Amino acid sequence: MRLTLTQMVTLDGVMQGPGSPDEDTSGGFTQGGWVWPYFDEDFSAFVDENFRRADAFLLGRRTYEIFAAYWPKQSGDPVSDALNSLPKYVASTTLAGADWEGAQVIGGDLAAEVTALKEQPGRELQMHGSAGLARSLFADGLIDTVHLIVLPVVLGAGKRLFAEGTLPTAFRNADTRVTRTGVVIGTYEREGAPEYASL
């Protein structure tokens, strides 16, 4: 399976607390819930298409807890159908277990465990959010595809997906679409190390 990451970010690269004001207030962050004003039919259509390609999910602990509190109570749409029926792997060293049906905790040598998951047959092992986990897997060169959903808002503070020290990586743009509310959804395939030259 290919490991894909879908991440919402602001123009200044902030990914913290997109869904609601209380989603992630760590570090004193008070600007959560910045996605909603831009969510429209185009955005929703991309989300549905994306979840239809999943064969399994890889989630960080915080994302797992947010999803597990909401999605098991939902049904009848591509997102809930996929999340409630497919395997979910939760990367955590603090959770003793996962009680959402189809979920299991993985830990220890995370790079080795994710590599083993990627070697299983299937289309996509999908990550949604889970930025801390994503940064770790970027460092190990394990993320194959990034769906970067860039919203036309600047927050000026908050956690960033590509923080200082991120592994230098070149990507190829595989698809770009723009929603009616101005959200740019870019799909990028990892190509290896960047190339450098004088312009």
Image (tube, helix red, strand yellow):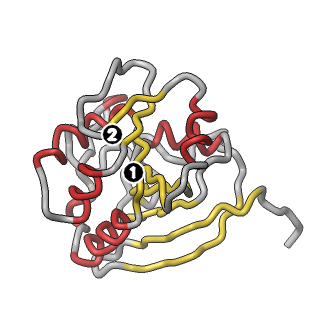
Q: How many marks?
A: 2
Badge 1 is on which residue?
128
Q: Residue 146, position in %: x, y?
A: 53, 60
**Above or below, comparing residue 158 to residue 150 in the picture:** above
Q: Quadrant of residue 178?
A: bottom left
**Above or below, comparing residue 159 to residue 79 in the picture:** above
Badge 2 is on which residue?
63
Q: On residue 82, which mark appears?
A: none
Q: Neighbour class for label 1 at 10 Å: few (<14), some, many (≥20)?
A: some
Q: Quadrant of residue 7?
A: bottom left
- Separation of marks 2 and 1 at Cα, in angstroms: 8 Å
Q: Amino acid at mark 2?
A: Thr
Q: Quadrant of the N terminus?
A: bottom right
Q: Amino acid at mark 1?
A: His
Q: Are marks 2 and 1 in contact (CB under 8 Å)?
A: yes
Q: Residue 135, position in %: x, y?
A: 55, 41
**Above or below, comparing residue 92 to residue 136 in the picture:** above
Q: Residue 17, position in %: x, y?
A: 30, 44
Q: What residue sits 39% from the left and 18% below the top?
A: 94
Tell me if I can see residue 11 in this picture: yes
Q: Quadrant of the C terminus?
A: bottom right
Under circle 2, the secondary element is: helix
Q: In the image, is 174 to the left or to the right of 69?
A: right
Q: What residue sits 25% from the left and 43% below the top?
A: 67
Q: Residue 176, position in %: x, y?
A: 49, 78
The residue lying furthest to the front in this view is 121
Q: What residue sits 45% from the left and 32% below the top?
A: 91
